[in-house]
């Protein structure tokens, strides 16, 4: 009977050790994971750190916004059709909608940009113009939307209108027949009155969110590095034993004469 008990004890001992090891590992992992309450308490204790980081982040966002040059965007709408109008035959409409994809690439090409530079006598390269040009195909339509951005709203309007005129002429020359393919400027550009960039409100909000996140992370990191116990409650929490009493700080003797 003793031998049987001894064998069962030897069998149970490794299992118990494994369970203790697993429990200890889970406890360590649980200690490493901070709860939301602990994060908020750490941020509150280090509130000054959070405030400083937020102020720095917002300040950088404001400085970045002020350093940016305002950009204005103007646009035109080009109709791709036949004989200068809208296609009425439903069977041909789908074919022209597919063709507008090719036309979008054609308007955003070096030959068109070279024509604009020559027409307006611009001191800019075709690559610079194309770098500020944006072309979009209106879904399920024969229209192409073309956008151009510039530091000057008047120049943005002038250049994008020139793109429409030059492109229409190029398509007409490539299709001399009356019934051939046409690209007509359906809606000419207007002078933009508001800048598309910078966006100060968006930049400040981004700086605020980023600064708040970095500030909380830094506050939690500083709290985790500070191992000092500051209250009897923390002592009880760490030791698992209730606090029976505290030792007050030494009070300096105010009577220097020993009276």
Image: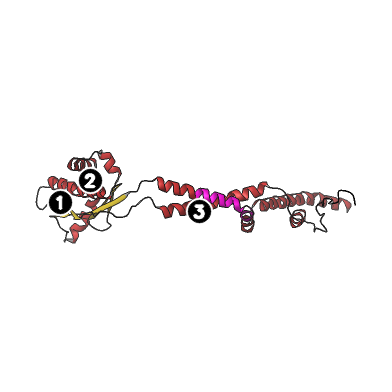
Q: Cβ–Cβ below 8 Å for labels 3 and 2? A: no
- Residue 167: give x, y in percent of width and height: 19, 47
Quadrant position of the N terminus in the picture: bottom right
> Residue at 24% across / 50% down in the picture?
157
- The residue to which callout 2 is attached is 106
Q: Position of residue 130 (x, y in %)?
A: 27, 43
Residue holding disc 1: 181
Residue at the image point whose x is 27% and y is 52% from the top: 74
Which coloring applies here? secondary structure
Left or right side of 93 for 177: left
Magenta stretch, main secondary structure class: helix
**Which residue is identified by label 3?**
209
* Image coords of residue 187 (percent x, y): 21, 56
Instruction: Give yes or no for residue 53 being in the magenta stretch.
Output: yes
Cα distance in 3D space between marks 1 and 3: 52 Å
Tag 2, which secondary structure? helix
> Alpha carbon of mark 3 to alpha carbon of mark 2: how far?
42 Å
Asked which secondary structure carries label 3, the reply is helix
Which of disc 2 and disc 3 is earlier in sequence? 2
């Amino acid at each position: 009977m003793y031998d049987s008990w001894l064998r069962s004890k030897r069998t149970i001992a490794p299992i118990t050790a494994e369970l203790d090891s697993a429990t200890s590992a889970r406890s360590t992992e649980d200690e490493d994971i901070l709860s939301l309450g602990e994060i908020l308490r750490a941020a509150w204790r280090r509130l000054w750190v959070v405030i400083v980081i937020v102020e720095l982040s917002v300040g950088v966002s404001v400085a970045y916004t002020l350093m940016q040059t305002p950009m204005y965007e103007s646009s035109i709408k080009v109709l791709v059709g036949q004989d200068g109008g809208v296609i009425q035959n439903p069977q041909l409409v789908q074919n022209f909608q597919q063709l507008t994809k090719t036309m979008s690439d054609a308007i955003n090409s070096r030959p068109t940009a070279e024509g604009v530079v020559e027409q307006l006598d611009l001191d800019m390269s075709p690559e610079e113009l194309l770098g500020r040009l944006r072309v979009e195909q209106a879904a399920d339509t024969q229209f192409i939307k073309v956008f151009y951005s510039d530091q000057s709203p008047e120049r943005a309007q002038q250049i994008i209108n020139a793109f429409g005129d030059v492109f229409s002429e190029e398509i007409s020359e490539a299709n001399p027949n009356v019934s051939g393919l046409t690209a007509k400027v359906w809606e000419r550009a207007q002078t933009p009155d508001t800048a598309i960039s910078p966006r100060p409100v968006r930049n400040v909000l981004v700086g605020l969110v980023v600064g708040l996140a970095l500030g909380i992370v830094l506050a939690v990191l500083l709290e985790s590095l500070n191992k000092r116990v500051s209250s009897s409650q923390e002592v009880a929490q760490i030791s698992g034993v209730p606090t029976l009493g505290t030792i007050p700080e030494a009070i300096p003797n105010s009577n220097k004469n020993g009276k």
